[in-house]
Amino acid sequence: MKFSNRLHIEYILIFIAVMTFSSTAVFKSRAMKKFDSLDQKFIEIQKSELGISEIEKDCVPYTYFDKNLSQKFQSLRSLVLSDTDDLFAIEVSQFQNEIHKSQRNISFGYDSFLYFSAILFLIALGIIVTKKISQKAEFERREAISEEQKNFSRNLHDGIAQDLAAIKIYHKKGDDDKAAFYADRALSEVRYLIDSSRLEFDEDFESLIKKKLAAFEANHEIKTTTIITSDFLGKLKSESQVEILHILQEALSNIARHANATEVKVRITDVVDEMRFSISDNGKGFLEEAVESQKSDGKNAQRKHWGLNNIRERVQKLGGTVEFINDGGTTVAIRIPN
């Protein structure tokens, strides 16, 4: 674990910000009260209701570090002794103005600390948000990896394991041609799964789709054509992208194992407020109802049935609809709302 994660720097910043803000607010409030009190005393002095010596203690914070103010305060004392009332009133007013300048400087200093604490708080908030986003992205990545592993295992069990079992059966029967057929199919499926597992989700999503189709074409020797004209595709969330890749892989696996196709076309376009995603092959086609009725007749029918169910479930997660169309081959037609 990183040092910053152990230290939780964001909480330290929040603590510093809160302490700075609260202490500064207290000191500024007390200073403002003293400012108001001193102003009131200046008014009383000008009305001759208060003597100059009675504000000396309140003026010390301003005169102690300011020699000019200290000298002016001493001159006010001498004017009191000289009994020149008009001049004294003018000097008191000028001295009060000088005090006000110091008050503004002090107030600006307090405000700077308040702004500083606010900036610290915003930085801490930014760190927290960044960590939350990072944690969410990591969670989604782990979910995607977990789902990919499940899908990989299912393909091994439902596809390759059955081919290996068929090889064993036909080898015992001495039927080398069929054994070789299933061996080639299992090898192509293994290569395809390995190539598919190398995809990186930090790539452009359109590139991922094209790479998956290129891997399929290379390993199953079935020509692929890709047409992508969708703006919505690039705006999908990562979990939705994963679902679409799984749908594509499931459909391609079904085509490789059951369709006897020589060509696959994938088209992704936008129509009004929905994305349309179709996967078509020129194979022997099938009727969905026939697969449903045959699902208990054999492993191949079961595999195809499970493949359709998997596609349906994933499309439902995306809030879309799917149709399986027999048009000389098979078309998986999916609609996903924007």
Image: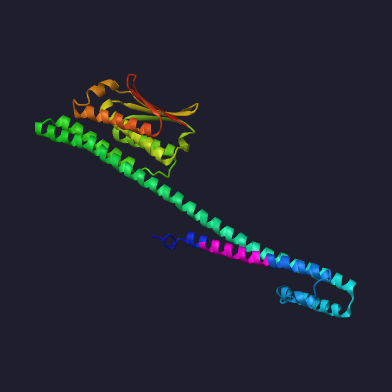
Answer whether residue 25 is magenta in the image: yes
Residue 167 visible in the shown view: yes
Decide: is 287 above or below 81: above
Quadrant assignment, res 192: top left
Residue 237 location in percent, x, y?
Answer: 44, 40
Q: Is residue 119 positioned above or below 69 on the image?
A: above
Residue reaching furthest top?
328
| Of residues 313 and 18, the one drawn nearer to the viewer in this rendering | 18
Residue drawn at 43 percent across, 39 percent down:
205
**Residue farthest along the left direction in this orientation:** 173
Please indicate whether residue 123 sits to the left or right of residue 61 in the image.
left
Q: Position of residue 146 (x, y in %)?
A: 32, 44
**Residue shown at 32% from the left, 42% from the top:** 148
**Number of numbered discs present?**
0
Query: Over which residues does the magenta segment extend?
Result: 15-31
126 versus 257 height, above or below: below
Q: Position of residue 207 (x, y in %)?
A: 42, 38
